[in-house]
Image (cartoon, coloured by chain):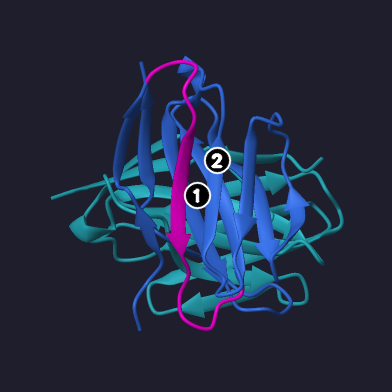
Chain colours: A blue, B cyan
Amino acid sequence: KAGVTQTPRYLIKTRGQQVTLSCSPISGHRSVSWYQQTPGQGLQFLFEYFSETQRNKGNFPGRFSGRQFSNSRSEMNVSTLELGDSALYLCASSLVGENSPLHFGNGTRLTVT
Amino acid sequence: GENVEQHPSTLSVQEGDSAVIKCTYSDSASNYFPWYKQELGKRPQLIIDIRSNVGEKKDQRIAVTLNKTAKHFSLHITETQPEDSAVYFCAASRTGTASKLTFGTGTRLQVTL
């Protein structure tokens, strides 16, 4: 089975721009979550989508948004980029069910200059 | 919200020795505790998880113990090998929010020859 696929692997953007990251979950996984990983803050939960609906949300500003499509693929968008948004953005998918383990993708490394 | 503390931040052991990483959590409603291993430049990978109705779980050289009263759980790696060198993260989540993991700050484990 193919793992969680994230594209692109690397992105360089300028302050004020916006960016869209893409995630394809493991086949059969209908829940997709997004995490931000930085050296200073570690791994932080952004949001989770299931059946095209946001099911849980972390403590990030409204500039961070996401969506899920009917095939469970997900995108996250960051608008008005700030230098502090530079991070590794990780997508994770899981089966539906209580405490199903998360399987992470390799991430998208976003650099904001 | 949930807060997960992880210690130590770095750990150096000789090959063949045991390594122990400890985490404490604050939310008494948390009931799922996974551990992830992240090698340099790679995605976090689930190595073991435990649910609150179990006190201990073992998988070959890896074991996790949970003390719900003390809100404390630990990862034990026996007979360490160089390939165990990585950053290890503990995490916690509560019922109904399994994808919303709160991570510890990570432990960098170095296994020396």
Which chain letter goes with mark 1? B
Q: Main secondary structure of the magenta part?
A: loop
Q: Secondary structure at mark 2?
A: strand
Mark 1 touches mark 2? (CB < 8 Å): no
Q: Is residue B91 left or right of residue A6?
A: right
Which chain letter goes with mark 2? A
- Which is closer to the viewer, label 1 or label 2? 2
Residue A29: x percent and y percent?
Answer: 55, 77
Q: Please say if B99 is above or below A41.
A: below
Residue type beneath disc 1 = Phe
Q: Quadrant of residue A6?
A: bottom left
Asked if the magenta segment contains residue A23, the reply would be: yes
- Residue in view at x 76 percent, y 54 percent: A56
Report the front residue among B105 and A42: A42
Residue B93: x percent and y percent?
Answer: 72, 57
Residue that numbered label 1 is attached to = B89
Report the front residue among B46 and B42: B42
Residue that numbered label 2 is attached to = A77
Residue type beneath disc 2 = Asn
> Which residues are the magenta region?
A14-30
- Residue in view at x 31 percent, y 49 percent: B86
